[in-house]
Image: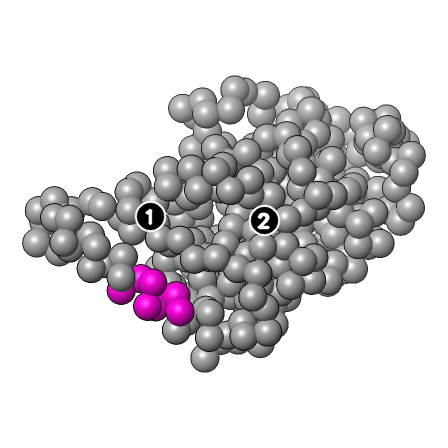
């Protein structure tokens, strides 16, 4: 299912958790792993100087400096590289998200793996929202393949893969996310958890919803899941359906934790708009920053099976 994987790294400790997942996937799928780092942005035009994205210092770009950066990458991942069988280490100059997307298109990769942030700060910090809005946001928006984001150490991941949590809001983008989640679950023999969080915020009248209204919404959501998703997976019976009411991102995190989720799969956005114009949905953003397992953001129908009806 994964022949080519792009691990986009800052070559710093903030990407260590993502690195472990990337190397695990390379071995499990016998894939080609691209270890890719964009180390500097040109100070102007075709200037021989770049601003290093990690240190903020100005460096003169030449072949020796590029090789030095690549050697530093090898040192950073020396333990993981010992078991790696098919990898390419590359360091380039440019704007990070542009170069990552360019590389992904050029190599036609099946997945991009990234850390959730690029700075050394505590998980859950108030500034996280601003951090998520940078390179990861732009890559997830434009990538033609799923983008898997890792914010914390992954204890199971793909080595002991058994539970995929697919979260839907019934948008078109969620249809694409479902196809990818189902395909992956079927391929690895994992249980597919089809989950919907019914928002208990203000109802259509602007008043708090009563219990009867909540129960009606839950019943309606279950019917939609049966029609929209279950009807498409008659060849796969290892799945479950759950609908919880509450604040969506909170319920998603609780459900994934209680069911030992190895991967959460969500649509990159929820509104019915062109993917290229979409921004990372607030629910996805909150899940990414707090989940104890990787989160896959799906934005395009490419790299999934046939488009749903």
Residue pictured at 22% horizontal, 46% vertical: 200
Q: How crowded is mark 1: few (under 14 residues within 10 Å), some or many (20 or more)?
A: some
Marks 2 and 1 close (CB-CB < 8 Å): no
Image quadrant where residue 80 sits: top right
Spot occupied by residue 237 in the image (x, y as percentages of width and height): 56, 66
Of residues 33 and 177, the one nearer the viewer is 177
Q: How crowded is mark 2: few (under 14 residues within 10 Å), some or many (20 or more)?
A: many
Residue located beneath label 1 in the image: 244
Which of the marked residues, 2 or 1, is nearer the chain's N terminus?
A: 2
Mark 2 element type: strand
- The label number, if any, that marks residue 208 in the structure image: none
Asked if residue 250 lies left or right of residue 40, the reply is left
Q: Quadrant of the C terminus?
A: bottom left
- The label number, if any, that marks residue 163 in the structure image: 2
Label 2 to label 1: alpha-carbon separation: 18 Å
Which residues, given as a range, are shown in magenta?
Answer: 220-226
Image quadrant where residue 70 sits: top right
One can see residue 77 in this view: yes
Of residues 219 and 49, the one nearer the viewer is 219
Spot occupied by residue 156 in the image (x, y as percentages of width and height): 67, 38
Of residues 55 and 36, the one nearer the viewer is 36
Figure label count: 2
């Amino acid at each position: 299912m994964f022949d080519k994987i792009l691990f986009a790294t800052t070559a710093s400790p903030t990407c260590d958790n993502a690195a472990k997942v990337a190397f695990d996937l390379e071995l499990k799928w016998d894939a080609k792993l691209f270890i890719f780092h964009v180390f500097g942005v040109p100070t102007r035009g075709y200037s021989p100087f770049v601003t290093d994205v990690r240190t903020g210092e100005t460096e003169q770009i030449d072949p020796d400096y590029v090789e030095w950066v690549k050697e530093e990458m090898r040192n950073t991942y020396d333990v993981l590289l010992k078991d790696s069988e098919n990898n390419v280490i590359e360091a380039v100059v440019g704007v990070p998200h542009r170069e990552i997307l360019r590389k992904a298109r050029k190599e036609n990769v099946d997945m991009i793996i990234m850390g959730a942030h690029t700075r050394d700060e505590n998980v859950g910090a108030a500034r996280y929202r601003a951090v998520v809005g940078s390179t990861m946001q732009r890559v997830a928006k434009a990538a033609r393949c799923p983008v898997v984001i890792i914010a914390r150490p992954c204890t199971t991941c793909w080595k002991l893969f058994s539970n995929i949590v697919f979260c839907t809001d019934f948008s078109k983008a969620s249809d694409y996310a479902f196809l990818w989640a189902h395909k992956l679950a079927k391929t690895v023999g994992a249980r597919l958890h089809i989950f919907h969080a019914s928002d208990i915020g203000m109802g259509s009248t602007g008043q708090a919803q009563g219990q009867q209204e909540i129960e009606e919404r839950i019943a309606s959501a279950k019917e939609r899941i049966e029609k929209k998703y279950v009807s498409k997976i008659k060849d796969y019976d290892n799945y479950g359906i759950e609908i919880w009411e509450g604040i969506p991102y909170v319920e998603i995190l609780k459900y994934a934790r209680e069911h030992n989720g190895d991967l959460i799969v969500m649509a990159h956005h929820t509104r019915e708009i062109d993917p290229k114009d979409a921004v990372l949905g607030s629910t996805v953003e909150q899940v990414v920053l707090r989940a104890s397992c990787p989160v896959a953001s799906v934005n395009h129908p490419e790299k999934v099976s046939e488009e749903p009806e």
